[in-house]
Amino acid sequence: MTHKFTSIKFLLLSLLCFFIFAGQAFALEPSQKELKDFLAILDRQSKDYGWKDIKLEGIPWEYYRTTIQKKPLIFAVFGGYKSNCILFLGGVHGDELPTVYVLLKFANYIKDNPDFFKDKCIIIAPLINPDGFFAKSPARVNASGIDLNRNFPTRDWQALAWKQWERKCHKNKRYYPGRKPGSEQETLFQIALINRFKPQKILTIHSPLGFYDFDGPSSDLDSFERWIETVSKETKHPLKKFGYFPGSLGNYAGHERNIFTLTLELPSSAPNRGMEYFNKFQPAIVKFFDLQVFGKEPFLKLTDEAIKKH
Ligand SMILES: [Zn+2]
């Protein structure tokens, strides 16, 4: 009798193991399908915007998180190195359409010129807010109505985020920071990229304000400013110190975590100007990319060589 029970238990345990493992194996399929479907709608949307030179296949897209509307939060890692990383972020505000083009184009450029980038570490997340981007009328905020550039858990969030939203933004819904910091998957996605890759530099692309802005280690903010002043002249694009907000990336990454964070505000949000902007800003992107950082936090500095060179 006991023996029979043991056999039945063994059988049940085996079946349980089978279903767990089989479940895991099958679980991969929906995620691959989800990515494929997402790339297909992104491809269609790109074609609709006239971004005919963008190819999404052949890029090593990955994703681990989805939005509230089940859209994958995609990124691609290029280069063979795992240190001195640079992180590119686009489409944080879903209605800033050419920012997505510029980064998809940059991903294509890296894919086509792998030798230039083989000893680098580059992470490209071209579409942080897909729900806003794919909305019937593209939206700055995500599907929960939150401005993702006000939702980072910065030290001043609790004290100031709502206060500033009420006083400075007059409760404009476009700048709503959320009920609490770090509440959104899209915010957690950016934090996860920062934690995993520990980038020394971040380039975040927005539109349509038309300037460069920067945040970074206070130990070397002057050199960074001098460097951007030169790039600003060369690319004929103004530099404006916009300051940072409670819950903004510049505050979270640049001010609080000593990451050299450059914001490129494109001059308009018109999707058909994407190619023009890529061509105009490609030299600045490459220069930022080549900018050398040395030292350990909180004494990160740009090298003299890097500053003189520009
Ligand atoms: Zn923006």
Image: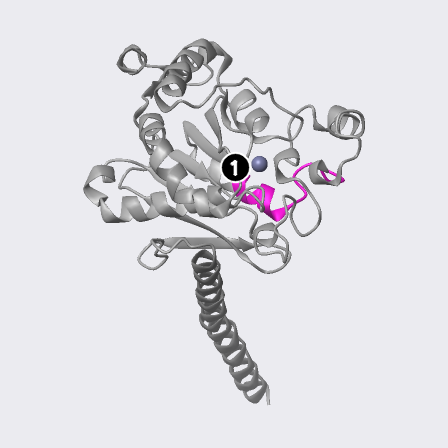
Kind of residue at disc 1: Ser
User: x, y percentage for residue 89?
Assistant: 47, 39
Q: Residue furthest left?
A: 115
Q: Secondary structure at mark 1?
A: loop
In which of the image's four quarters is ligand 1 placed? top right
Residue at point 57%, 48% (across, down): 129
User: x, y percentage for residue 158?
Assistant: 75, 28
Q: Which residues are magenta?
A: 177-191
Q: Does residue 126 appear in the picture of this structure?
A: no
Horizontal side of 38 relative to 163 (left or right) equals left
User: x, y percentage for residue 5?
Assistant: 59, 85
Horizontal side of 256 relative to 308 (left or right) equals right
Q: Nearer the viewer, residue 93 or 46?
A: 46
Horizontal side of 122 relative to 138 (left or right) equals left
User: Is 185 contained in the magenta span?
Assistant: yes
Q: Which residue is mark 1?
A: 268
Q: Residues within 10 Å of mark 1 (few under 14, many from 20)?
A: some
Horizontal side of 58 relative to 3 (left or right) equals left
